[in-house]
Image (cartoon, rainbow, N blue to C red):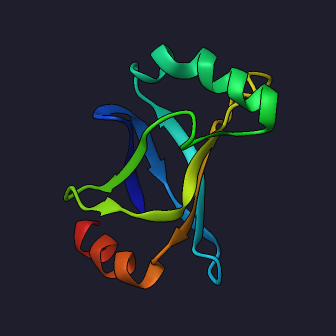
């Protein structure tokens, strides 16, 4: 499920999410960062170093599908960016997967 990741209204990249825990509504994928991500990257990495993830308490993350539908994440959205590896992982929990599965099929 290809999605767009924002901090507030700034697009910071795209993510091709996969379901990693259906019962908990958890999706995860690698961030393909936009140039805007660089503005936030050092702070994201600092939060990761301090507590293992940069999450919604630190930033106002939003995820949308291509058609603009916002994915609601009751359990929060987080970014794992250690700076030691090239991969930046985005996770969201508490997502109503059945609701977004139909929308995602329409936007492919």
Q: Position of residue 54 (x, y in %)?
A: 64, 36
Residue at 57% x, 33% y: name it: 58
Residue at 40% x, 57% y: name it: 2
Q: Is residue 38 above or below residue 67?
A: above
Q: How many marks?
A: 0
Q: Quadrant of residue 80?
A: top right
Q: Quadrant of residue 96?
A: bottom left
Q: Quadrant of residue 19?
A: bottom right
Q: Position of residue 62 (x, y in %)?
A: 39, 47
Quadrant of the rendering where the C terminus is positioned: bottom left
Q: Is residue 54 above or below residue 63?
A: above
Residue at 36% x, 81% y: name it: 99
Q: Is residue 81 above or below residue 14?
A: above
What is the residue that sits farthest to the left in this orientation? 67
Q: Nearer the viewer, residue 89 or 107?
A: 89
Q: Is residue 82 above or below residue 90?
A: above
Q: Is residue 62 left or right of residue 26?
A: left
Quadrant of the rendering where the N terminus is positioned: bottom left
Q: Is residue 3 left or right of residue 108?
A: right
Q: Position of residue 29 (x, y in %)?
A: 58, 53
Q: Position of residue 53 (x, y in %)?
A: 71, 39
């Amino acid at each position: 499920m290809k999605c767009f990741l924002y901090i507030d209204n700034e697009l910071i990249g795209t993510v091709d999410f996969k379901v990693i825990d259906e019962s908990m509504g958890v999706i995860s994928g690698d961030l393909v960062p936009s140039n805007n991500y660089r503005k936030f990257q050092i702070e994201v990495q600092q939060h990761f170093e301090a507590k293992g993830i940069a999450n919604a308490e630190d930033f106002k993350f939003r995820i949308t599908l291509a058609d603009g539908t916002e994915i609601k994440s009751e359990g929060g959205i987080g970014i794992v960016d250690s700076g030691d590896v090239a991969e930046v992982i985005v996770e969201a929990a508490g997502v109503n997967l059945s609701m977004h599965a139909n929308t995602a099929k329409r936007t492919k």
